[in-house]
Amino acid sequence: MSNTPLNVGLVGGGKGAFIVHPHQKAIHFDGTRRVVAGALFPDPKIALEEAAKWPYPIRGYASYDEMIAANATLPAEQKLDYILIVTPNFVHFDPAMKAMKAGIAVFCEKPLCLNLKEANELLKTSRKLNVPFAVAHTYLGHWTTRLARYIVQSGLLGEVRWVDSYYVQGWLATKLEATGQQQATWRVDPKKAGGSGCGGDIGTHALMQLRYVTGLEISELSAQLETFVEGRQLDDHFTVYCRLSNGGRALVRASQICIGSKNDLGIAVAGTKGSLRWSQESPESLTICLPNQPDRVYWRGAVTPGDGFLPKDMPTDLMAEPTIPAGHPEAFHDAFARLHRCFEADVRRWKAGEKFACDGSKYANVEDGWTGLAFIETAVKSAAANGKWTKFPKL
Ligand SMILES: NC(=O)c1ccc[n+]([C@@H]2O[C@H](COP(=O)([O-])OP(=O)(O)OC[C@H]3O[C@@H](n4cnc5c(N)ncnc54)[C@H](O)[C@@H]3O)[C@@H](O)[C@H]2O)c1
């Protein structure tokens, strides 16, 4: 396999942007990927100025249309290998679609797009063109999330009865958007954010954590979408009670009005034999509770197979993955890097004409992105009918 770094083009990321920065660090984490180009801002002149100011040299484009068109006709080995879409939700669909059609793989921020209609189109096109497609559900990238998935899905906790999956923040407890704060302003605008504010922004992360760890799907839901800050059009508090595909129950909840809560995303799973707890604000360990035993705390990098709970033959790829010893903390950027690393492997296989996975086991894919939009739309519908139990659409 070639050791030439993969070339990445950015869509968005200029002038005070947020999430591009963790991504661009994660892209450079291993030396096998690099950012080489960008269409960083909607205004063409500012887009070029921002690219010229980027901390290392990149090729600036006046628009993502121009960047994608310039690459569309290049031979495969000269093309951008993937684009990273870090624009507000209403600017996900168009560049993702155009990139796939130009033969460029796509790593897109969540939620996948603005509504289920767009998600259907993206899903159809990615299947037809067979292009690798990742959706940036960051918290799947923590090693402990992977361990949690292994523990739950190999049945070590028995049958899943109950899941509490949550993401609680406090930064929108006041009308921050009235101050012009960049990240708040578009997130409260339905034309730019989509049908749900808090649910689309962070409820989709809680949903993805539930689905990735348990492997279960939602069959029906009953939702309440609430807006506490006066004059805001979209929900800032989002509570969804779910019936799961195995007959279990779950609460997927998110809030942005809980003063003091920062990025309190976590999951608690209760099975017939034991329970699991994990929180992204202390992502280096998870806790297992078994009946009549002291709680077990498992740390990344310090797990012993065959310890009386974990089996001897744990998956080698899972056990080989942590790269630094326990106690040297991994966190948010490492999680992003793990997602880009796994996506890189698929992009390299695809470019070599080999079969690639993109199956949702290492990072969220376009099917997961579709499910996020189906979740938002079903929750909005249920909430409008005062929490009526509403069937979840099938993929
Ligand atoms: N995975 C996560 O943990 C996570 C965290 C935060 C945000 N996000 C998602 O990332 C996306 C961006 O969020 P953010 O908080 O970084 O927003 P932001 O407002 O900080 O940045 C958006 C960027 O997109 C640019 N942009 C807008 N329209 C454009 C266009 N037509 N062409 C080129 N650039 C354009 C803006 O100029 C800005 O640089 C959203 O979809 C959000 O939901 C994900």
Image (tube, helix red, strand yellow):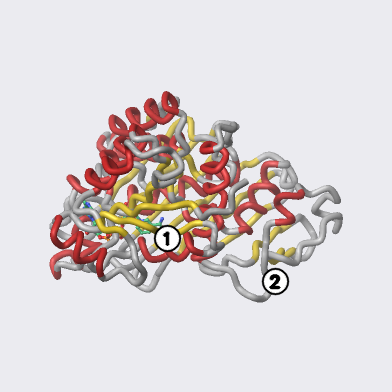
Nearest to the observer: residue 308 or residue 52: 52
Q: Distance between the residues labelled 2 and 1?
A: 24 Å
Disc 2 crowd, CA 10 A, few/some/many (<14, 14-19, 20+): some
Expressed as whole percent of the image width and height from the top left, the position of residue 313 reads: 83, 48
- Tell me if the residue at label 2 has its CB under 8 Å from ligand 1: no
Disc 1 crowd, CA 10 A, few/some/many (<14, 14-19, 20+): many
Nearest to the observer: residue 381 or residue 199: 199
Expressed as whole percent of the image width and height from the top left, the position of residue 317 reads: 71, 49
Expressed as whole percent of the image width and height from the top left, the position of residue 100 reads: 37, 35
Tell me what residue is drawn at x 76 percent, y 55 percent. Answer: 291
Q: Quadrant of the C terminus?
A: top left
Q: Which amino acid does label 2 sit on?
A: Ala
Residue at label 1? Answer: 23
**In the rendered image, is residue 132 in sight?**
yes
Expressed as whole percent of the image width and height from the top left, the position of residue 56 reads: 36, 69
80 above or below 334?
A: above
Residue at the farthest bottom position: 328
Residue 106, picture quadrant: top left
Q: What residue type is labelled 1?
A: His
Residue at label 2? Answer: 326
